[in-house]
């Protein structure tokens, strides 16, 4: 048997401020609460968006995501939180974190300019079992780094007509894997990143869409 618990929240009680987040509990034991060496299997995202204060037509978004080791996994392979071997939780699976920052400005009606920064990393990779010489509940969070990604982006969107948009963007990404625990940097890169996006990459694009 395997069960999970979810909790989402969204708070708009303070003018100009939106607080939001989600918590996923995969495995919980009260004996681990307050224990410095043992942990429960949680994943959470928390963030806020501050709009039109202190500057009008300017918004700031900040988000943080963290997933403890062994979250989404199970000692029985058929009971992992996955479908056809694809994880149904966070794309970085367990033992990972992600930071997102964005600044958006609307200088004139229908024109939106957004700058964003993104950093994600994945730690040591372990199997969930009790036969490999380690305690799955005592693995340190992000002790080592096996993969990380830094992205800086600039997006300019203009609403030509109602719900008709044209967008141009530029992104700079730095995506790397690291040799660790008997696995090569290339293996970790291929796990989380398509080959085309390995290393340093500058991307420029233009898009057109209707309805959203």
Image (cartoon, rainbow, N blue to C red):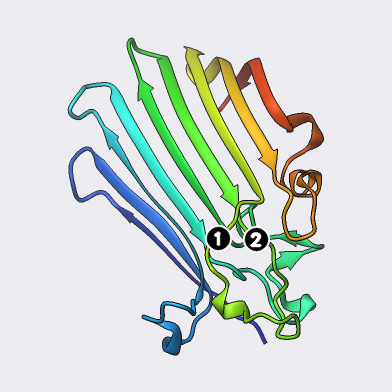
Residue 43: x, y in percent?
Answer: 51, 63
Residue 116: x, y in percent?
Answer: 46, 28
Q: Quadrant of residue 124?
A: bottom right
Query: How many numbered markers are drawn?
Result: 2
Q: Is residue 53 left or right of residue 167?
A: left
Is residue 185 or residue 212 the one in the foreground? 185
Residue under label 1: 143
Asked if residue 56 is positioned above or below residue 197 in the image, the reply reads above
Quarter of the figure that contains the C terminus: top right
Is residue 167 or residue 128 the one in the foreground? 128
Q: Mark on residue 124?
A: 2
Residue 17: x, y in percent?
Answer: 24, 42
Q: Find numbered disc 1 in the image and state the secondary structure of the residue it sits on.
A: loop
Name the residue: 66% across, 80% down: 134
- The Cα atoms of the two marked residues, 1 and 2, are separated by 7 Å
Quarter of the figure that contains the N terminus: bottom right
Is residue 206 or residue 70 the one in the foreground? 70
Name the residue: 66% across, 47% down: 147
Q: Find numbered disc 2 in the image and state the secondary structure of the residue it sits on.
A: loop
Asked if residue 176 is positioned above or below residue 139 in the image, the reply reads above
Name the residue: 54% across, 17% down: 165
Pointer 1 with pointer 2, Cβ within 8 A: yes
**Disc on the earlier residue, 1 or 2:** 2
Q: Is residue 202 left or right of residue 45?
A: right
Asked if residue 106 is positioned above or below residue 11 in the image, the reply reads above
Q: Is residue 154 left or right of residue 51?
A: right
Q: Quadrant of residue 8?
A: bottom left
Residue 77: x, y in percent?
Answer: 78, 76
Q: Mark on residue 4?
A: none
Is residue 59 or residue 124 the one in the foreground? 124
Asked if residue 150 is positioned above or below residue 202 in the image, the reply reads below
Name the residue: 27% across, 36% down: 50
């Amino acid at each position: 048997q395997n069960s999970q618990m979810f909790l989402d929240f969204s708070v708009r009680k303070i003018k100009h401020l939106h607080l939001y987040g989600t918590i996923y509990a995969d495995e919980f034991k009260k004996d681990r609460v307050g224990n410095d060496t043992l942990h429960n299997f949680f994943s959470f995202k928390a963030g806020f968006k501050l709009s039109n204060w202190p500057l009008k037509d300017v918004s700031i978004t900040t988000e943080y995501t963290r997933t403890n080791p062994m979250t989404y996994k199970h000692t029985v392979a058929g009971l992992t939180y996955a479908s056809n071997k694809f994880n149904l939780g966070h794309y970085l699976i367990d033992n990972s974190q992600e930071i997102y920052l964005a600044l958006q400005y609307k200088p004139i009606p229908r024109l939106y300019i957004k700058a964003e920064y993104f950093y994600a990393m994945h730690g040591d990779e372990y199997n969930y079992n009790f036969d490999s010489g380690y305690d799955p509940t005592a693995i340190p969070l992000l002790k080592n780094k096996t993969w990380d990604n830094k992205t800086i982006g600039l997006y300019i969107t203009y609403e030509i007509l109602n719900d008709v948009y044209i967008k141009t963007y530029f992104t700079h990404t730095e995506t790397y894997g690291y040799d660790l625990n008997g696995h090569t940097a290339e293996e970790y890169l291929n796990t989380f990143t398509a080959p085309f996006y390995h290393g340093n990459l500058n991307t420029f694009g233009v898009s057109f869409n209707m309805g959203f």
